[in-house]
């Protein structure tokens, strides 16, 4: 099992930056895939970015070039650096982990981008 705790959300103006963090309860080097999803009101949860052991990363087209996912194994933490934020990035951002075949989710952190 793994517990995930997000932090770093908040209210920010369009064009600004924000970084959200996710601390895992176990070594992230033992987790095959970690990532960030988001869910806006009235919409389905969608993948924002993911990273696999070995370093491969994947991004939604809507955030490519603006968002960067990174990890710090010493802190068991995954980050999502969000630059050039847009109002359409407003959503609850969820940390996701898949050690093997089971999915684990954090409680979510709200990111609101004002125009």
Image (cartoon, rainbow, N blue to C red):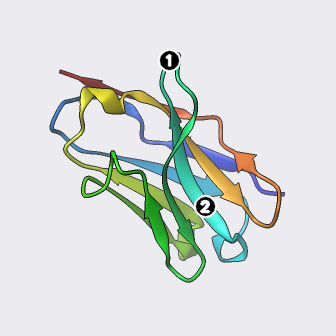
Write the residue at 34% across / 33% down: 89
Residue 102 found in image quarter: bottom right
Is residue 20 toward the left or the right of residue 4 in the image?
Answer: left
Write the residue at 56% across / 75% down: 73
Is residue 85 toward the left or the right of residue 72 in the image?
Answer: left
Write the residue at 49% across / 42% down: 7
Is residue 55 toward the left or the right of residue 12 in the image?
Answer: right
* 2 or 1: mark nearer the eye: 1
Q: Nearer the viewer, residue 45 or 110?
A: 45
Hey, which residue is sitting farthest bottom in the picture? 54
Residue 18, horizontal then vertical, whole percent: 30, 44
Residue 103, horizontal then vertical, whole percent: 76, 51
Residue 37 found in image quarter: top right
Q: CA distance from mark 2 to mark 1?
A: 23 Å
**SS for tag 1?**
loop
Residue 39, horizontal then vertical, whole percent: 52, 30
Q: Is residue 76 above or below residue 9?
A: below
Residue 104, horizontal then vertical, whole percent: 74, 49
Q: Nearer the viewer, residue 22 or 55?
A: 55
Mark 2 touches mark 1? (CB < 8 Å): no
Within 10 Å of disc 2 (Cα), the crowding (few <14, some 14-19, many 20+) is: many
Q: Is residue 31 above or below residue 47?
A: below
Q: Which residue is mark 2?
A: 34
Hey, which residue is sitting farthest front in the picture? 61
Write the residue at 31% across / 28% down: 88
Answer with mark 2 or mark 1, whichever residue precedes in sequence.
2
Is residue 106 toward the left or the right of residue 56 in the image?
Answer: right
Within 10 Å of disc 1 (Cα), the crowding (few <14, some 14-19, many 20+) is: few
Q: Which residue is mark 1?
A: 41
Q: Work out which quarter of the rendered image holds the C terminus and state it.
A: top left
**SS for tag 2?**
strand
């Amino acid at each position: 099992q793994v517990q995930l705790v997000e932090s770093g959300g908040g209210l920010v103006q369009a064009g600004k930056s924000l970084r959200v963090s996710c601390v895992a309860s176990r070594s992230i080097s033992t987790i095959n895939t970690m990532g960030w999803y988001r869910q806006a009101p009235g919409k389905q949860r969608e993948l924002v970015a993911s990273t696999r052991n070995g370093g491969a990363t994947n991004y939604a087209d809507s955030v490519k070039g603006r968002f960067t996912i990174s990890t710090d194994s010493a802190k068991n933490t995954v980050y999502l650096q969000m630059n050039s934020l847009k109002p359409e990035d407003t959503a609850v951002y969820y940390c996701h982990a898949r050690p093997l075949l089971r999915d684990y989710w954090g409680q979510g952190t709200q990111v609101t981008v004002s125009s």
